[in-house]
């Protein structure tokens, strides 16, 4: 009986591992492509903020979005992200304040402040976009995050172009590879109905 169970795990595990490896490679390829094109809005996916100030990761995303905005890629920006345990500030609001300080008019910035997971954030973003009659977005995040986030927002009916923030890493290491595998697992779970 134990052999049969081990064989069943092996038979199911090998194709699953192969699928995850192929998916991780697709995520890696997407992470290197900047698809920025004319769109209705530039969407900045949230990252940590510290007491009302963007973390280095969030600041890098915001700076990249700001550069796209100044190039005329879209007339609006949409910052996203919930409180993440901070009772005073949300990632979306911190992003908005940062962009205003950089000279972006407040009326050009939309804010999603409810998201506590990638899926929840993107569902909220899609609701905002539908309400504002926006159909396309340039999504700014870290490269490893673009593949999954892009597909979630496309599933919500939007046209999405990925634009990863510039990376400071010179060459891929095991941490970056682990991010691709983690995103592959999260994508697979989302596909089977477990939102993360």
Image (cartoon, grey):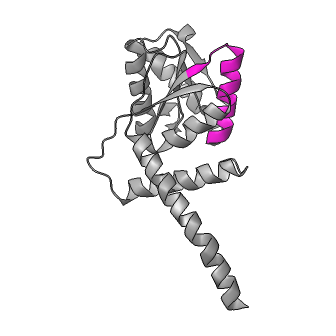
What's the residue at 56%, 71% (across, down)?
14
Picture quarter with the N terminus: bottom right
Residue 40 occupies quadrant? top right
Instruction: Tell me which segment is drawn in magenta.
Output: 118-136
Q: Is residue 10 above or below residue 159?
A: below
Residue 65 occupies quadrant? top left
Q: Is residue 119 magenta?
A: yes
The percent coordinates of residue 104 (x first, y second) are 46, 12
What's the residue at 67%, 48% (across, down)?
191
The answer to whether one can see residue 71 in this image is yes
Q: Nearer the viewer, residue 38 or 165?
A: 38
Residue 144 occupies quadrant? top left
The answer to whether one can see residue 82 in this image is no
The percent coordinates of residue 151 (x first, y second) are 59, 38
What's the residue at 42%, 48% (across, down)?
28
The percent coordinates of residue 169 (x first, y second) are 30, 46
Q: Nearer the viewer, residue 53 or 1?
A: 1
Q: Nearer the viewer, residue 14 or 31?
A: 14
Residue occupying the far left of the picture? 170
Total numbered labels placed on residues in the image: 0
Q: Is residue 83 above or below residue 18?
A: above
Q: Is residue 190 magenta?
A: no
Q: Is residue 15 above or below residue 32?
A: below
The percent coordinates of residue 61 (x first, y second) are 43, 31
């Amino acid at each position: 009986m134990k052999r049969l169970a081990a064989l069943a795990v092996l038979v199911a595990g090998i194709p699953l591992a192969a699928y995850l490896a192929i998916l991780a490679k697709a995520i890696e390829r997407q992470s290197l492509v900047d698809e920025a094109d004319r769109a209705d809005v530039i969407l900045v996916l949230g990252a940590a903020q510290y007491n009302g100030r963007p973390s280095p990761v969030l600041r890098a995303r915001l700076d990249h979005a700001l550069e796209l905005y100044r190039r005329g890629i879209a007339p609006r920006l949409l910052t996203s992200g919930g409180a993440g345990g901070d009772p005073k500030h949300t990632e979306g609001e911190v992003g908005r304040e940062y962009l205003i300080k950089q000279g972006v008019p407040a009326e050009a910035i939309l804010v999603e402040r409810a998201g506590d997971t990638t899926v929840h954030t993107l569902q909220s973003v899609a609701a905002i976009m539908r309400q504002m009659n926006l159909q396309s977005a340039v999504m700014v995040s870290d490269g490893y995050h673009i593949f999954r986030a892009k597909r979630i927002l496309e599933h919500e009916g939007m046209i999405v172009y990925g634009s990863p923030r510039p990376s400071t890493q010179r060459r891929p290491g095991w941490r970056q590879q682990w991010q691709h595998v983690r995103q592959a697992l999260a994508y697979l779970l989302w596909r089977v109905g477990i939102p993360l």
